[in-house]
Amino acid sequence: MESSGNEDPLWCLLSLILIFSLVASLLATPNVTIETYLPLTSEDITQSPSLSEKRNESRQKRKRNVWSVIESTDTKLVLKRRKIADFRPEDLKAFFRLLEDPVIRKFLDSDSHFKVADKYLLSVAVEYSGRVTLPAYTHNRVRFLVAPFIANQIEEDDMKSKFSMMPVLFGKRLWHSLYYDFRRVQRKFIVAMNWRVLVTCQICDEIQAQAPTHWVWERDRDLLT
């Protein structure tokens, strides 16, 4: 009993030392290395967009809508939401220029019943040119031909008429081997438009109204006898 009584103060002292050492370790500040990004030049600072700028840019990319008055009476006002077209005047000018291309003229002449490229499908092609947001001088024969095929696939999906035009575009011997490349270009074109492939009749009419007497708008199926 006497030996245990002598050991109690010693154990108390050791316990206090252990407690003080733990408290000291908790209060000590650890060495932490914080890595930060510092722009190399002032140009890097100006080129890094803020969060608000990114939000404004995303809002501008959204499809804009306007409201048109359809009917107005003393007690009722009927509104209709109308989408604003994306085509630019330079897109329509490039479209008219490509109509004189001999390959495109042969393509249009071969589509005598306007199954693949009537006036509405060609108007959709003009709208597509604005949606890819590329400079007008980059519009070429391939992009011109891809757009009506996409429009036909979305609006009508007339596979028979589209396949009948393949030999006209690529030749009877090569069209089988080039067809899948053509389809690959179509998919890239759709992605470039951000999958916005639907075009309203109002936008088509607006495009045709820019040059109502142009011969290409005579490709009207209703006028076929």
Image: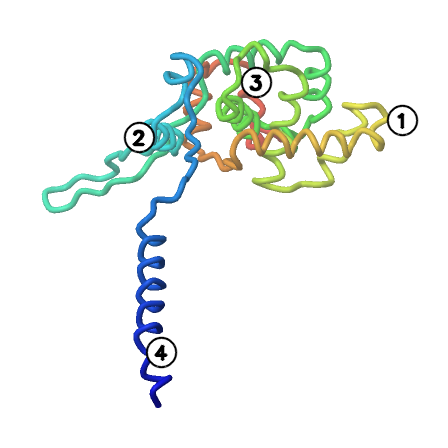
Q: Which residue is mark 4?
A: 7
Height in image: 164 above or below 157? Answer: above
- Residues at marks 3 and 1, CA–CA distance in whole angstroms: 30 Å
Instruction: Quarter of the image for the C terminus: give it.
Output: top right
Residue drawn at x 64%, y 42% is 157
| SS under mark 3 | helix
Residue drawn at x 41%, y 31% is 202
- Residues at marks 4 and 1, CA–CA distance in whole angstroms: 104 Å
Quadrant position of residue 76 = top left
Give whichever of discs 3 and 1 has the lower sequence position: 1
Question: Which kind of residue does numbered mark 4 sit on?
Answer: Glu
Q: What is the x, y in percent for residue 196?
A: 50, 36
Give whichever of 12, 46 is nearer the camera.
Answer: 12
Residue drawn at x 32%, y 53% is 24
Give whichever of discs 2 and 1 has the lower sequence position: 2
Give whichever of discs 4 and 1 has the lower sequence position: 4
Q: Which residue is mark 2?
A: 52
Quadrant position of residue 88 = top left
Give whichever of discs 2 and 3 has the lower sequence position: 2
Q: Is residue 86 left or right of residue 123?
A: left
Label of residue 173 in the image: 1
